[in-house]
Amino acid sequence: MMGGAAVFQLIGGYVGYRMETRFAVAIFGFIQATGFTLAVFAQGMPMAILFAVLFGAGFGGRNPLTVAIRAEYFGPNAFATITGISSAPMYLFMLAAPLFAAFVFDTQGSYMIAWLILGGFGSLTGVFFLMAKKPQLSTLAFEKK
């Protein structure tokens, strides 16, 4: 998975120069969510490898693009602030997701429902990136006070 992610870091950066960044982020997000959802159906090594390849490709391809889109949309002056603000929900989700999966397993005896729900959330992030529009700079921001 991490090997695929490393290769797709480079591919994601290349794709980001060839198409609108939000579309590229969405595509890699959908690839990652597809891989994650395949974990539900992994009963043998071939499906586990397919999961690892798709999840790694989506994860690796998306990473450089999410950095790039912050710079494109908000510029260098707000980059650190926007990165901090946008990272907080991601880290909360990364904290809550395994706890949610464990709760589902403890109550249902299976991870299937949790993986499908979390895969759905992953797909939803792709939809949100498709809906994202570059903010319009206000002329008021450039006026002298």
Image (cartoon, rainbow, N blue to C red):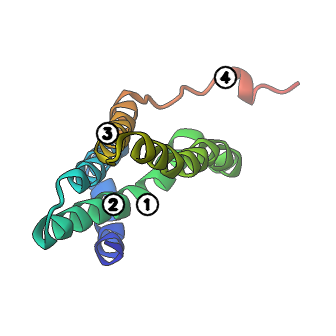
Which residue was labeled with disc 2? Answer: 61
Residue found 68% across the figure and 48% down from its top:
84
Snapshot quadrant of residue 49: bottom left
Helix, strand or loop under label 2:
helix
The answer to whether any part of residue 5 appears in the image is: yes
Residue in the picture at 72% in, 21% down: 140
Q: Nearer the viewer, residue 23 or 6?
A: 6
SS for callout 4: helix
How far is disc 3 from disc 2 in space, using C-alphas?
Answer: 27 Å
Instruction: Compute the Cα span from label 1 to label 2.
Output: 7 Å
Q: CA distance from mark 1 to mark 4?
A: 30 Å
User: Is residue 49 depicted above or below 96 in this figure?
Assistant: below
Q: Is tag 2's residue or tag 4's residue first in the polypeptide sequence?
A: 2
**For this rendering, which residue is in front, 135 or 121?**
121
Q: Is residue 69 left or right of residue 144?
A: left
> Is label 3 in a helix, a strand or a loop?
helix
Instruction: Work out how far the residue at label 1 is from the one at label 3, CA to CA, in angstroms.
Output: 30 Å
Q: Are marks 1 and 2 in contact (CB under 8 Å)?
A: yes
- The label nearer to you, 1 versus 4, is 1
Q: Position of residue 13 (x, y in %)?
A: 35, 63
Label 1 Cα crowd, 10 Å radius (few <14 / some 14-19 / many 20+): some
Q: Earlier in the sequence, mark 1 or mark 3?
A: 1
User: What residue is pinned by disc 1?
Assistant: 64
**In the picture provided, is 84 more to the left or to the right than 68?**
right
Q: Residues within 10 Å of mark 2 (few under 14, many from 20)?
A: many
Residue 139: give its label. 4
- Which percent across, then down, holds residue 71? 55, 49
* Residue type at tag 4: Thr
Residue farthest along the bottom direction in this orientation:
3
